[in-house]
Structure formats: C-alpha cells, structure tokens
Image: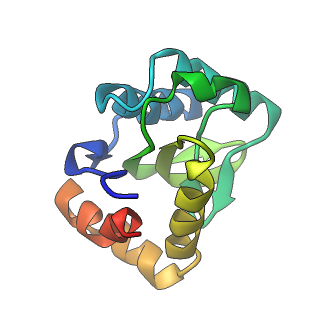
C-alpha cells in the first residue's frame, strides 16, 4: 500500500474556517490527486451527517459512505493542518485527514493514522511543523506496508 499520501496531498495551513469548508478542502485534495470523483466529497458530507468524524486529539477524519465506493479510483489520504482550531461539533480540530480506500483499504489507513494521533508527542510535533513538507515527513509512514 504505497503512495497513499504524496507531498501534494498535504496542506499547511488550510484555508477553511468551518467544519463544512474543512470537509470540502480535504475532499478537494483527494479529487485533485485523482483518487476520487467529485461525488465522493458529497458522500463525505453524508457520512458526517450520520456520524461525526471527530476522533480526538485535534483530529477529524472525514470520509465517504459505503455507498460511495464506486467513486474511489485509488486509496489516498489528504492532510490539512489549521493554524487556528476549527469547531467540529464543539470539539477543536487542527487536522482534517480525508480518507479514501479501495476494497476496504481505508480501514488499514485509518488504523495507521489513529496510531500516530494517539501519541500526544507526535500530535505536538505535527502542530509545531512549520511546513507541509515537515508534516509529510512526520506522516510518511502511512505509505509503508
């Protein structure tokens, strides 16, 4: 499972100031990467309406519904870090990590992201990173099998 996260799929800082804009921003990066069709972004909003994708430790992982599988062309991540926290259903989010997985691949991707974000020291390193390149370097392990 290589190349699910490329340098062009990391944005620091993000431009969104609301949850909806953050979902749109994370989704558009996946579209621009050729990983999903634009309809996948709509499915990300559908998922969010049914269950919040806020995970804790400043992280939200917006992703599509099971019904949107046919809009995914390859497994990929998008990572957007915000300088100012975004209100995500009453929680502070500094990272919106968009996920698209082919044939259940999103579960392995989600697991790798969860491991990184469960470590408060790693989260602080990601917050302190000055550039998208630094964030990418800290997260490159998600590309490893």
Nearer to the camera, 136 or 141 = 141
Question: Number of callouts in the render?
Answer: 0
Nearer to the camera, 137 or 124 = 137
| 46 with respect to 20 (left or right) | right
| 52 with respect to 58 (left or right) | right
Furthest-front residue in this view: 103
| 132 with respect to 24 (left or right) | left
The correct choice, above or below, for 94 with respect to 71 in the image is below
Furthest-top residue in this view: 39
Furthest-right residue in this view: 50
Residue 131 visible to an observer of this rendering:
no
The correct choice, above or below, for 120 with respect to 83 in the image is below
Residue 88: x, y in percent? 64, 43
The correct choice, above or below, for 94 with respect to 123 in the image is above
Colouring of the image: rainbow
Residue 130 visible to an observer of this rendering:
yes
| Residue name at image x 22 percent, y 55 percent | 132
| Residue name at image x 26 percent, y 61 percent | 136
Nearer to the camera, 89 or 55 = 55
Residue 44: x, y in percent? 61, 29
Residue 118: x, y in percent? 59, 76
Residue 46: x, y in percent? 71, 24
| 103 with respect to 29 (left or right) | right
| Residue name at image x 35 percent, y 62 percent | 143
The quarter of the picture where residue 36 lies is top left
The quarter of the picture where residue 37 lies is top left
Nearer to the camera, 34 or 95 = 34
| Residue name at image x 53 percent, y 40 percent | 102
């Amino acid at each position: 499972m290589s190349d699910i996260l490329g340098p062009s799929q990391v944005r620091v800082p993000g431009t969104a100031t609301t949850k909806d804009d953050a979902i749109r921003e994370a989704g558009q990066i996946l579209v621009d990467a050729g990983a999903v069709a634009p309809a996948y972004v709509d499915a990300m909003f559908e998922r969010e309406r049914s269950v919040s994708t806020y995970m804790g430790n400043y992280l939200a992982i917006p992703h599509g519904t099971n019904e949107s599988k046919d809009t995914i062309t390859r497994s990929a991540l998008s990572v957007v870090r915000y300088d100012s926290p975004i209100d995500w259903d009453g929680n502070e989010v500094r990272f919106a990590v968009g996920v698209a997985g082919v044939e259940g691949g999103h579960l392995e991707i989600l697991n790798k992201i969860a491991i990184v974000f469960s470590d408060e020291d790693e989260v602080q390193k990601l917050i302190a990173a000055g550039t998208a390149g630094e964030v990418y370097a800290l997260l490159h392990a998600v590309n490893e099998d």
